[in-house]
Image (cartoon, rainbow, N blue to C red):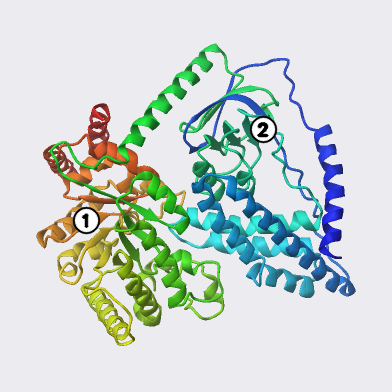
Amino acid sequence: MKTEKLEAKGAERSADRAAAAEATRRVPVRSKVREQVIRGIPVAPGIAIGPVYDTTEIPAEAPRRTVPPEQAEAEKGRLADSVALSRKQLGKLKTRLLVLPEEAQEELAPLLDAYVLMLGNSRLLRGARKRIEGELLSAETAVLDEAEAIAAAILAAKDDDKAGLYRRAQEVREIARRLTRNLTATPFRSLKGVPEGAILVAEELTPADAALLDPARIAGVATDEGGADGHTAIMLRALGIPSVLGASGLSESVARGDQAVLDGSAGTIVLRPGPAALERGREALAAFARERTKLGKLRRLPAVTTDGEPVELMANLEIPAELPLIAQAGAQGIGLLRTEFLFMNREDLPDEEAQLAAYGEVVEAMGEDPVTIRVLDWGGEKDMEAHASGIAPTHGGPNPALGLRGLRLLLKRPELLEAQFAAILRVAERGNVRILLPLVTNPSEVKQAREIYERVARRLRRRGERLPEALPDLGVMIETPGAALAADAIALEADFFAIGTNDLAMYTLAVDRAEAEVSHLYDPLHPAVLRLMQFATEAALRLRMPVSVCGEMAGNPRLVPLLLGLGIRSLSMNASAIPRVKQAVRALDIADCARFARRVMEQSDPARIHGLVMGFAEGVSERA
């Protein structure tokens, strides 16, 4: 079957199914119209007031089935046709990006590129073809089985970055969904009929669906499924559309045309609001507009306390697509560039040139602002497709978080570290670059890394590469109790510290916050965690060495007074958190913060510490 035939058949069946779906679309009984509040996950802030436009997507009919041996080749042909059609659709979608805001383009373009790569000689398609040949599965069944196997392996990885794992799993499922819909000639969701000013309601939206939304026309978005960390959520935030996802039961409770008030900050949707709820919605809309204007003005203002102490507010960067959000937030640089994105979803390791191109894009975009690049932080609990090929080491075990990971892995495989060092050194001439070493536990590890670093620099100079006269600073992540307690010795080998509070709390309290049974024990304000942070900070300050916090604590405005009181003057966080943290900084006095921090550090009861922190934060909020 040729791709053209598949398209023609799809168009014919699309029209039939769309008509049938509209004819049988469920219309709720409305004899008792009552105000109803449904809660979900706040995803994109803002208030939307308008009529609901509900849309459903016809499910692809792909029952599990096998085929006779003589039909296997035909099934592989069907799969090839579906791949070709999917690539064509993604090409059209990329053209559609040109009419979207720049931030949305920057978010979705790399994702579409990743989709196109998965339609090449990827693990998904190789596995699907093997299943057709070996298990005599239909093309649809083979694609879905292989996609679920890959997604399950990704989600089973014991990685702190659960949101990243979820996004990667959903990328695989989304391509499988597209292939399956094309194999079964099932139409995709159409959003052309959404009226201006409407609140779009659906069971779930894919990132490709989000790309079709016009932020000038859509007032808000609400779905039954989804979460705050997926690509769809990132897209909606980039588009600036107030959104609530994961509002269970929503689509069953609305009829097209119902009035609604959506609060993307609180995560609520009020259906069929009465006069009081409508008035509250209008007041919230006006208040949000005032707050957005106020925070927008902060972008150009310095992060300086009331007594004139400057505080450096940096952004963490997961993938280059987030660069527009960093610029929009007014970050003073990148305090943590995670390089793992270069190693994901590929069968081989990125060479020096590939890394040079990626780092160059980020460094040049940031101009003179500093960029701190953390070398590969990989461990046995993290899945990387290169592991399967034997190019990268497999290093799992009964306790992977305590195994061969971070810097200890890179020292065991120095060629990985040398390639990263070389790429970073070559890009250092273009901007203000620093290098960060992950999961350090003792000074000798830093010594070994520095020896490799300087050896690579000498080799590059002999090769004729232009490098800065003074090599970029080499810093250390403080994220284990061992590193914190040995901070005074490590400080003699390092140029700066970055305290990673997420892992520091996990290792100190022996708690995986992703494990439901013990997540309540995860507490970055536990006195043991705070004392380790204090010890590491004081070790750095004694040598007048820069020290920053780059974990989630840095992005919490309520914790800023404590961090400043401990002596921290550099914070790195998600870009979206910067305006509110800056607002808190500009309302603080350093002497007050120091007195407050001393009072907190005298406590041994976590509940008492929480009470003190929240109480102080309320006072700051009133002054801000």
Q: Are marks 1 and 2 in contact (CB under 8 Å)?
A: no
Amino acid residing under circle 1:
Leu
Up/down of 525 relative to 153, above or below: above
Which of the 4 image quarters holds residue 474? bottom left
Which of the 4 image quarters holds residue 223? top right
The reply to whether residue 536 is visible in this rendering is yes
Instruction: State the mark number for residue 251.
Output: 2
The residue that appears at 68% across and 54% down in the rendered structure is: 92
Q: Residue 70, image x and y in percent?
A: 89, 74
Observer-side mark, 1 or 2, equals 2
Mark 2 secondary-structure assignment: helix
Q: Residue 185, image x and y in percent?
A: 81, 53
Q: Which residue is mark 1?
A: 532
Q: Is residue 562 left or right of residue 82?
A: left
The residue that appears at 67% across and 29% down in the rendered structure is: 195
Mark 1 secondary-structure assignment: helix
Up/down of 70 relative to 298, above or below: below
Q: Is residue 470 left or right of residue 17?
A: left
Amino acid residing under circle 2:
Ser
The residue that appears at 52% across and 17% down in the rendered structure is: 277
Q: CA distance from mark 1 to mark 2?
A: 48 Å
Dot 1: within a 10 Å radius of its alpha carbon, few (fewer than 14), some, or many (20 or more) residues?
A: many
Q: Is residue 117 left or right of residue 609?
A: right
Q: Quadrant of the C terminus?
A: top left
The reply to whether residue 152 is visible in this rendering is no
